Amino acid sequence: MTVKEMQSEIIRLKKEKNICILAHAYQSHEILEVADYTGDSFGLSLNAAQAEADTILMCGVRFMAETVKILSPQKRVILSNSEAGCPMAEQMDVELVSQLKEDYPDYSTVCYINTTSELKTICDVCVTSSSAEKIIGNMQSDKILFIPDCNLGDYISKQLPDKTFKLVSGGCPTHLRISVRDVEKARQLHPDAELLVHPECHPKVTALADFVGSTTGIMSYAEKSDKTSFIIGTENSIVQHLQMSCPDKRFYPLSKDCVCHNMKLTTLADVYNCVRGVGGEEITLDENIRLGAKRCIDEMLRLNK
């Protein structure tokens, strides 16, 4: 079976079985081509909640599928590859964060969307990379315990100097592979290109960027910009996606090592097996955990209005 033949069969089966396919932007382009929605993790979960499909197939990592289930408990949610996790989401557990909350009782606990459902139940509000500044800025509390990504937390703290941040060691191992040396080398090779980076990168890297934003923020900036060449400081699949959507522009990876191996676990064959009903893992959540995590997400939606 060729790629095109497998894609055609996936499209046929998803329509026949009323399946909505979500693909995070870090997935391969051949998977994006069969998806109903593509983008960042939380945006996809909102798409899923509005979709009429009975079954949601998440081509991403576990916490993303959990978020879909939190917002769409009545739907069947499938994670395309059961081994696809997020190292950052697994860096902290309830016991650790509970201790941190005891150590900093007058701080409000803010968790990045890249956390487990269990962890969200003991946090005050959840944020995404694109909404964190607005949401934390709208919070009454001026003391913020931010978990788990200290790089994103550092970037947001610089945008909100009137608030006090407590950051805990944690972050995305994929974005942490990008170094200042990578920036220097890329600037030398492509002196006319703008540097676009994700706020999960090290502060020394984001300080050198022309634009800092979420994955979809980076893509939108590049697509709308009058510039014609860009160095991309996030997962390298974005380079290919941008080259496809903007063939008249040039895109260069900031680091050849910025690859999310968990995202790359999902293959087109995994998607094919899932729509056939012989692959993937159905996501289930204890109702108390789901409701506790939803409270955290609902507060994010309230503060983001």
Image (tube, grey):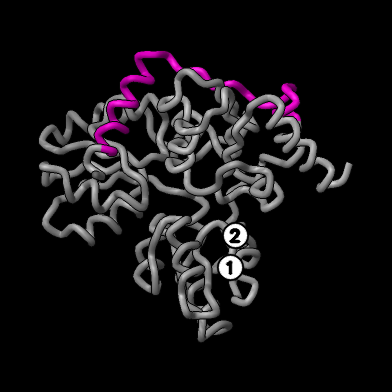
Q: Which residue is mark 1?
A: 253
Q: Residue at point 66% right, 50% down?
A: 28
Q: Which mark is residue 297?
A: none
Q: Which residues are magenta?
A: 273-301
Is residue 203 in the magenta section? no
> How many numbered circles does the render carry?
2
- Label 1 sits on a secondary structure element that is strand
Q: Residue at point 47% right, 79% down?
A: 226
Q: Quadrant of the C terminus?
A: top left
Which of these two is toward me, 35 or 232?
35
Q: Quadrant of the N terminus?
A: top right
Is tag 1's residue or tag 2's residue first in the polypeptide sequence?
A: 2
Is residue 284 in the magenta section? yes
Identify the main secondary structure in magenta: helix
* Farthest right residue in view: 1
Q: Which residue is mark 2?
A: 236
Q: Does the residue at mark 1 contact the one at mark 2 (Cβ under 8 Å)?
A: yes
In the rendered structure, which amino acid carries the disc numbered 2?
Asn
Q: Residue 291's spot in the image, x, y percent?
A: 33, 19
